[in-house]
Image (cartoon, rainbow, N blue to C red):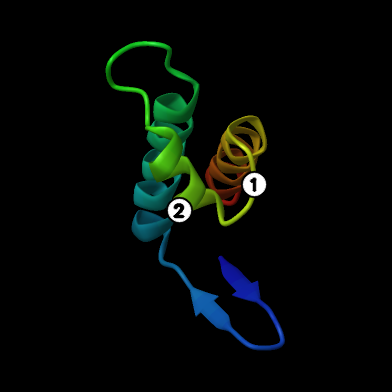
Amino acid sequence: MSVIDPAVSVRLSASEARRLAGMLAETAHLLEDAGPERLTDGQVAVLGQGADRAELAGWTRALAAELRAQR
């Protein structure tokens, strides 16, 4: 999979894309979890760079799904 931006270009192998998809899916889970494993508001602020918890969780789930679909 290639990700192209005017400033950045990234190429991932299939195994790297699977690994990143898994990490993104787990991050979404930690954003949505109501239990003790939930990411703190401070962690969300750093990871989200201005996005709120729900937006960041949706974005990470969508990106994980897109990466999985590119296999």
Separation of residues labelled 1 and 2 (CA atoms): 9 Å
Residue 13 rendering spot, x and y as whole percentages: 41, 66
Q: Is 37 rendered above or below residue 22?
A: above
Position of residue 22 in the picture relative to residue 70 (left or right)? left
Residue 30 at least partly seen: yes
Proximity of marks 1 and 2: CB atoms separated by less than 8 Å? no
- Label ID, residue 5: none
Q: Secondary structure at mark 2?
A: helix
Residue 14 rendering spot, x and y as whole percentages: 42, 58
Residue 48 rendering spot, x and y as whole percentages: 55, 50
Residue 12 rendering spot, x and y as whole percentages: 45, 68
- Mark 1 vs mark 2: which is more N-terminal? 2
Image quadrant for the N terminus? Answer: bottom right
Q: Nearer the viewer, residue 17 or 49?
A: 49
Q: Residue at point 67% right, 37% down?
A: 55
Q: Which residue is mark 2?
A: 46
Q: Secondary structure at mark 1?
A: loop
Residue 71 at least partly seen: no
- Label ID, residue 51: 1
Q: Residue at point 59% right, 72% down?
A: 2
Residue at far front of view = 42
Q: Amino acid at mark 1?
A: Ala
Q: Nearer the viewer, residue 43 or 66?
A: 43
Q: Quadrant of residue 39?
A: top left
Q: Nearer the viewer, residue 5 or 51?
A: 51
Crowding at label 2, few (<14), some or many (≥20) Cα neighbours within 10 Å?
Answer: few
Q: Nearer the viewer, residue 13 or 62?
A: 62
Residue at far right of view = 6
Q: How many marks?
A: 2
Q: Amino acid at mark 2?
A: Val
Q: Residue at point 56% right, 42% down?
A: 60
Residue at far bottom of view = 7
